[in-house]
Image (cartoon, rainbow, N blue to C red):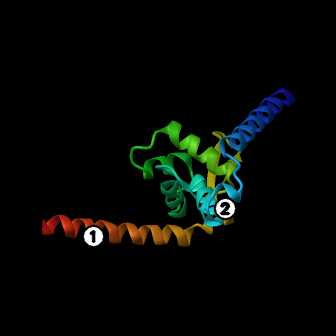
Amino acid sequence: MSKVFAICYTFVCSIQKYSTIKMKKTSTRDYSCPEMKYIHDTLYVISGKWKMLIIISLRNGNRRYREISKSIPRITFRMLSKELKEMELNKLVSRTVYNDTPVLIKYELTGYAKTLWPLLTEMINWGKQHRNIIKYDSQRN
């Protein structure tokens, strides 16, 4: 059992080391204003094709891997797994393993991730408005 623990521990440490290497540490003086650094940090955590969709899926009640996968069209199992691991490292998702037969794994949004919801709501509203503007302009021409 301790050998399995050692392997898991090594794996987790390598992921943490990779994530800190991947996110470039920049100081505020690298940007013309401090707001740019904060926007950069935010976009690093939430950017990508799938993260926002995963958050919405979890918010809509999907907790198991298969449920999340089915709720997001065209996401591959590999990509979902990668994104969930990255979101877990960024404290957006918590993963709970139940040692039943078969093993049950549930994902949940953390309280920290729930602070993103006002931002997501604004993004959804902006997306609706943008779609309507583009649609209206294309119908006029």
Kindly identify which residue carries mark 1: 132
- Of 50 and 38, nearer the camera is 38
Screen quadrant of the N terminus: top right
> In the figure, residue 43 lies in which quadrant?
bottom right
Q: How crowded is mark 2: few (under 14 residues within 10 Å), some or many (20 or more)?
A: some
Q: What element carries label 2?
A: loop
Q: Where is residue 38 in the image (x, y as percent from the top left)?
A: 63, 62
Q: Is mark 1 on a helix, strand or loop?
A: helix
- Of 22 and 77, nearer the camera is 22
Kindly identify which residue carries mark 2: 110
Screen quadrant of the C terminus: bottom left
Q: In the image, which disc is placed on residue 22?
A: none
- Which numbered disc, 2 or 1, marks the residue that appears first in the sequence? 2
Q: Residue at x 69, y 42 (%)?
A: 19
Q: Distance between the residues labelled 2 and 1?
A: 33 Å
- Of 132 and 115, nearer the camera is 132
When the figure is inspected, residue 14 is found, relative to residue 60, above or below; the finding is: above
Q: Which residue is drawn at 61% across and 61% down?
A: 32
